[in-house]
Amino acid sequence: MSHVRSRASTRAPARTDPRVDARPDTSPGLAATHDRTPASSGRGSRTALCLWLPTFELRLELVRSPELDRTSVALLSPGDGVRRTVWQVSERAHDAGVRTGQLVSQAVSLCPSLTLLEPDPAHYDAAVEAMLETLSGLTPVVEPSAERGRVFLGMDGLGRLYGSPHNQVRRVLHALFQVFPRPLVAATRAGLAPGTFGAWVAAVRARPGRPALVPEERLAEFLAACPVACLPVEDDMIRRLERLGVPTLGDLVKLPEPALVAQFGQDGRDALAWASGRRVDPVRAWHRPRPIRASLDFPSPAGQIDMLHGALDRLLERALSRPARRGRSIQTARLEAALEGGGSWTSETVLKEPSGDKGRLAYVLRSRMALSPPTRAVVSLTLEFTRFGPPSTQNDLFDRADADGRSAEGRTLSGGSIPGALRTAVRELKLRLGHSPLYRVVELDPWSRIPERRHALLNFDP
């Protein structure tokens, strides 16, 4: 009988070897957009090292629950939809017929003893951050991928520090022992080649503990034997190529470029460039801005949506008032909750237009929470601003954060009560226009029968 297990905190080896899909993302080396921005300058590193740990999340779960290592285990897909699906499976579960993407009912019918695990995204992200922090100490060019268990390292210029390419890879793998236990490091696959695409294909074809090193003069020969399914293009293009009798990259290179462009457009030209080794995408360093975090612990687990909305309002007030924000608008906000009984829940929201308005941010985050609420009662809730935009609004001339602004608000301006922001604005206008275009209303004869004599406009030049 299948059952859902909670997690323990013990770290222990994981010896599973799940079957995985070795297809890359839409573009090789594409990083996750929830907390990372590409560097705007620099040409990157031509020599790339790809580290890949298949089924990264499931292996971390088996490290925390080693007693499950000898059973059939499957990790559920994130979310709380009615029709839950299987995300990752262990080797025993795969042998029993369980596959990625199956409904839970189908997986249980194939393997009645299957153990289902709820995902813990906060734990996975923390492991990725620790890995990136460790690898950044070896090379300044680190490019994380959208897949948690895959990362690209720029290796240009490291020969003087670590010696031959084989020694460089061994030095990098040895650094992972600071983060992961030995079995996880031993299961990591490594591929060194020119460009992110070549390094990724080399890592997929490598065996655990035996890195694949591809020099530039052998790149085209190495890629020729690879299937076209490894190309970072749309699935429809892969299926069409296979139906046309083009199973490998070597067969693809034999086709004329005009014919590929006629059939697939720019994707055909790019695929030919990747397959022939003419296109080498460098590894580019990714800037990870320091996020703004605000956390709130509940005295007792909160399961009511009204309590979560109230906690979200308080977290927004705290995060928006942090000096580190400096008036910047918010582009990406992330909610993270620790759940009762273990596990976590995360929800990331990317705003179409950056905003610093509390009401708008609260509406967007509440809507996102309504679509995918926490699966259990919440023990603690954390709000994190990971990406920022330009200044949210123009500075208020009567800013209540300024002492002069508070004293001048709602009163007649005099020489001693003019806010500093207003003085600065007038000074900039005078420099641009040559005179102050601002005027103020002065009361002259409020009881006069002639309206024009009651008030007058005087030039405002503090």
Image: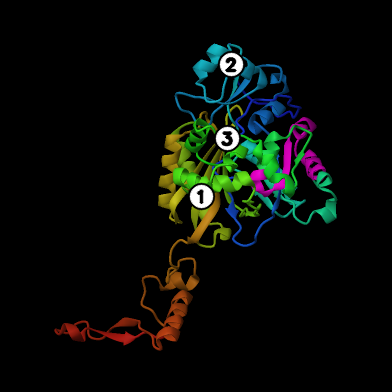
Frontmost of labels 2 and 1 is: 2
Closest to the observer, 97 or 149: 97
The residue that label 2 is drawn on is: 97
Residue at the extreme bottom of the image, as rendered: 434
Q: Height in image: 43 above or below 315?
A: below
Frontmost of labels 3 and 1 is: 3
Image spot of residue 237 (x, y percent) = 49, 38
State the quadrant of the C terminus: bottom left
Image spot of residue 441 (x, y percent) = 30, 81
Disc 2 residue type? Answer: Gly
Closest to the observer, 157 or 450: 157
Res 397 → quadrant: bottom left
Disc 3 residue type? Answer: Ala
Q: Secondary structure at mark 1?
A: strand
Q: Exactly how many numbered labels are in the figure?
A: 3
Q: Height in image: 228 above or below 460?
A: above
Residue, x 76% and y 27% (percent of image)? Answer: 13
Q: Is residue 295 visible?
A: yes
The residue that label 3 is drawn on is: 229
Write the start and end of the magenta stretch as one range.
Answer: 169-198
